[in-house]
Amino acid sequence: MAGFIEQRVGIQRPPPWFDRLGALVARELAPSPRKIRTALRVSMIVTIAIGLDASCHVNSQLGAVIVWLLAGAGPMMSIRRALAWQTAVMLALVTAVVTARAFAETPWLMLPVVFVWISFSTYLGVTRKLGVGVLVIQIVSLITFYGIVFSPGEIGWNAAAAFDGSAIAFGVVVLFDNWLWPDPGEPILIESLKASVARTRSQLLGASNFFLAGESAPQPPLPAPTSELPAHMALLDQAVAEGASEHRRAILLAAITLAARLSLEVDRLITTAREKLPRDIRTMVRGDVQMAVDAIAAALGEISHQLPARIVMGADELAPATRTRVRLAMDNLAARVVEIRPAYIGKAGSAEIGNFAEFIDSLAVLARQLERLLDEPPAPATTQPSNRAVARATAPADPALVRYCVKVGLCTVVGYTIGLLVQREDLFIILVTVITTATPTYGATLNKMYLRITGAIVGGAVSLLVIIIVSPNFDTLPTYLLVTFVVFYTFAYSSLGNARLSFAGKQMGVIFSLVIVGLSPSVNIYEPLWRIWGVLLGDFVVAMVFFALWPEYAGNSLLPRLQKVLANLLALAPSGPASTSEDQILKTNSETMRVLTEFLEIADDARMEGRTCAVYHDGIVEAAGTLRRISNRLSSIASARLLIQMPRLDPATEFARERFFNTIRDQLNSWLDFFSGAERFSASAARLIAQKRSADELAEPLNEFSSHLEEGGFARLASWPLEPRRTMLAELQLMRRLEVLFSELNRYLADVPRAPRQGSRIEG
């Protein structure tokens, strides 16, 4: 009957992507105590600042925009930092006013000034990680350059109002961040990681139940198209800006990478479990699969319960009982699969066999991830010279970053020109759209464009409703603030989901602030429409420059960083240039951790680009995790050799030991040459390099060195003092781990320039 009605009346079921979009929105807007508290905090900060602006007769919408951008969007604001930013705003306004007055009669001559200023400030903001602060300075400068064309006589008053509004914004944020309601980034990050691991556990159980029970269990939803990685990386940057040490950043990065790798593998497992195929093989091993899943779920539950209190470190510690249970369950499952293989080979179809192998492979990958406790990076030295800023200042400029800054400056000039031609002061929003939407990579920029348009439409619609309903009927400050609080609470809540989607919520607040907020609620019904039109024009300008004229894909941003990491690993290897001093070892390892942080950010950009991207998101995340482990182990070996003077072994043993590290250097050099060459995006060339690197290449010298060392019950070490003997045995264990890690690295680096493999993963 229902089908007949649909055919007769013309009712059609929504397409699958619509259901996925609905599920995504429901997931992002799902309530949680953290979201409710944070939205309340942000809306209170914004409402109090707007009330102070109105009470002090600060006739500027920039105060609301600034406080909305600052609240909950960066590290806790100290008094010193706030004073520094307010001084920077003052200097930017003074410079902008003087420059704008000089070119008031010839605004076209201001275009080179706008180009140079925006390009330079963007470069400074990215390289110094200034965050939203540099965005505030750019906005107050641009509105001065733009406003001189339409109201030259008001430029001084407008600059003074912008200064007052920013002072109130910084003051209120400092008050909340330091005394009334501080909300530091590291606890939020750890809580978010806990929720991520718990969600991964729940998805694993749901997918395995459907895989084993079939139609009698609910089908797991498809993996979300978004990732939690951007939110975690933003919180990591916030924690570092709030004072987390390089050592602590490396630990947090390890936890983030582990959570991301677990989530990726469960996503693959869900995709495998959803396939509708015969279920003959899985029924033969139902109990063994269930035991393995339960053991993995127990380990994930243990991690999620530990995370709020601490992050367990130490790769060489004894595994907890839950991890031992995981290993035992996987061994039993592997033995059972071997046992039943003759029963299903020749009877089951190739699709069913491949699907079953994929599911078991995913369980094995999860088990390996859980068996490894997070490896602790080398401890910082007691005294480290503060030459980080000098090193950064003397480092050569990244060509990709320079191109990005030039493109932002060019887009700003084009937007400024459109405003001059149309002669609409409302179109200042074009410039704001450019500097908030343009990002270094194609995928991230495209995503921000969609979300900014969505935010502008929703924010404009809410502004129209307030203008139509509230402004004509209520004229008291308490009513004005109550409406503002409700609107900003809604927008703040919607901006607390995934870091990619939260941009839309932020843009809703920006549009509402520019349209409604002032000495009194706006009554101009056309202003929201012009703002939305300005956002569309700004996105069009960005699209023409960043997509049509000068596209920059995630792969272009990834390769220089990958080359840097591989070069750092070569420098950390024994006899490398970075292994000559403890300070140099720590600096090189810290630099590697910083670049790997950017790795993960680029990985999510690659996800957004989809099939147009020349690199594979999952391969980047997996490679980043393995590169991090290799860097920590090479740093530990280099530091131990410096701190503990070990006697030389006999020539045969020393030769085998040196041959192991020469092979490591040879493998790193081969990958460095590949990713620096003309075939760096060739999947077939990458596979060829990986195939040439057999497991025996490292195993042979390692086994030779180990057999020499263990001969006669470690007779060669019998005469050594305790500390050198302990250091040599620790190095042997690290070499064994490096053998496994380099086997994984070859496989993951081969996955970077290509699409994901089909079929089961072959473990080396």
Image: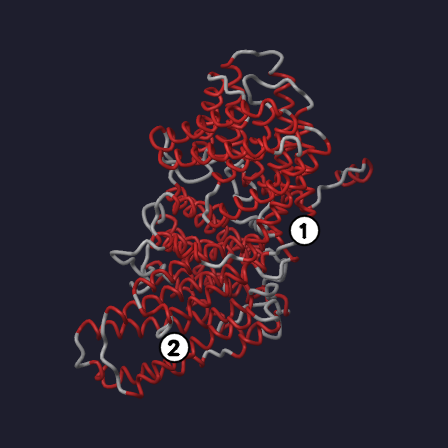
Q: How is the image coloured?
A: secondary structure
Disc 2: which residue: 661
Q: Is residue 363 above or below residue 407?
A: below
Q: Are marks 1 and 2 in contact (CB under 8 Å)?
A: no
The image quarter containing residue 633 is bottom left
| Amino acid type shown at disc 1 | Phe
Front tag of 1 and 2: 1
Can residue 508 be seen?
no
Residue at the image position 80 percent from the left and 38 percent from the top: 10
Residue 156 at x, y percent in the picture: 54, 24
Can residue 57 be seen?
yes
Disc 1: which residue: 547
Query: Quick one: 212 or 297, which is closer to the camera?
Result: 297
Query: Quick one: 95 or 526, which is closer to the camera?
Result: 95
Residue at the image position 51 percent from the left and 36 percent from the top: 137
Sequence-first disc among 1 and 2: 1
User: Which element carries disc 1, helix, strand or loop?
Assistant: helix
Q: Residues within 10 Å of mark 1 (few under 14, many from 20)?
A: some
